[in-house]
Amino acid sequence: MKLRARVYLYSFLLGLPIALILGAFGWPTVLSSIERDRSSVWGIDQELIRDTISTSISRNFYPQRVLVHHNNRSRKAQIRYTIDTQLQHEIESVLQAHRPDYGVFVAVDPDTGRVLAIANHRRDSEVRENLALGGSYPSASVFKLVTAAAAIDLGKVNAETVIPFNGKSSSLYRKNVLHHKNNQWTQHLPLRVAFAKSVNTVFGRIGLEHVGGNQLRQYAKKFGFNRILSGDFQLPESKSTFNPEIDWEVVETAAGYTRKNTLSPVHAALLAASVINGGRILQPILVDSMTDDNGIVLYANEPVLTEAAILPKAAKQLQIMMRETVRSGSAQQSFKGFARGHFADIEVGGKTGSLRGSNPQGTYDWFIGYARRGEQKFAFAALCINESYWYVKSSYIARKAIENFFAPGRI
């Protein structure tokens, strides 16, 4: 029988934004410790941390101190989170300045899954729940990333493949998908441009003709849908619910033209991370370490290796398509003038998504993506939900995060 430690929260800072909480404490010096299995010594592992902090995290409370009981010993311990306080402060300030009805931003380290920022905002009231953990938001065209990844990984298409289509990029009609015929108005765009402009008909056809319902469902699961992704905190399942035997359901799912695909912002950031980490969907991590009052390390996070959802070469094709979104596609306006001066050598890729939803009511505006310069990089997901008026675009929120992360002289 495995003996597990008991961990009790005994001090909370209730109702404070995470950036203020983190800024209020100086962390103890972490002393060098003997190389041994800390989990066997203290009984603290990822599962125990998840069981201990998840309820608080879901309420936007981030406990700083816990009491660890193991083998008849008790120690007070401080939790050190993975949050980048500069980035966290910046995003909270941007959301407060523009005040969308609902605003969420999540940033992660694409190689480890460490959460670098997790910001929430409500225009008219205090945020009492952690919106970043909500799993009921329609994923909209963000799901096109899964469709593209599946088709590329299966060897059916690449970034330059042309899939002809009729109609507007934002429309999705049965005749244009199920009964396509070339005519004088037919458009012929390489896939990277169709992705950048989020052409529904193209991705509906790819899902039906090149991937197929059963394989689309399999790739959705590989990318984290319909399964638990929790690391050291609980994360609700994102859902992709469709009948793979019904053609039109496959089409709507592949195009993201359905409310049956749902996605949490944390999961969305992990999707973006997979594009620059070789195709791996990581577990999200919030706790960096736990130390006692003497600085002895009781727990230190170690990233969990995960299998790749797609081949690395397929992920590189997705990078081409996501860069096009920022360069000439649906996020172009928000990044106008970005690639100048200090930011000229930063690679930015992304995917937009927009759809009406009801929980909460409003238009859901997604922008997920990544930014990197050499070895310095992060992945992110921004979501703004506006009921009647547009206050700020999610792609603009992401731009401000990127500018902060790569700011000159940043520590």
Image (spheres, rainbow, N blue to C red):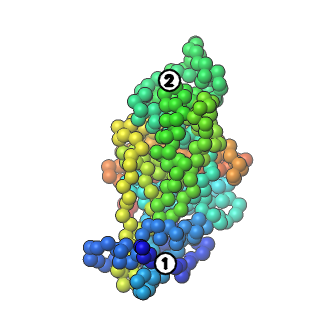
Vertical order, 88 against 291 (above or below): above
Residue beneath the point at 35% across and 80% down: 296
Sequence-earlier tag: 1 or 2: 1
Query: Which residue has dot 2 on it?
Result: 163
Helix, strand or loop at mark 2: loop
In depth, the one of 295 and 45 nearer the eye is: 45
View extreme (left): residue: 34
Amino acid under disc 2:
Ile
Query: Which residue has dot 1 on it?
Result: 7
Give percent across and percent down for residue 226: 55, 48
Amino acid under disc 1:
Val
Residue beneath the point at 36% across and 81% down: 295
The crowd level at tag 1 (other Cα within 10 Å; few <14, some 14-19, many 20+) is many
The crowd level at tag 2 (other Cα within 10 Å; few <14, some 14-19, many 20+) is some
Q: Quadrant of the N terminus?
A: bottom left
View extreme (front): residue: 1
In depth, the one of 227 and 97 nearer the eye is: 227
Give percent across and percent down for residue 197: 54, 33
Vertical order, 87 against 191 (above or below): below
Residue beneath the point at 43% across and 60% down: 114
Query: Whole-Å distance between the Cαs marked 1 and 2?
Result: 56 Å
- Residue 360 is left or right of residue 397, and the answer is right
Residue 230 visible to an observer of this rendering: yes
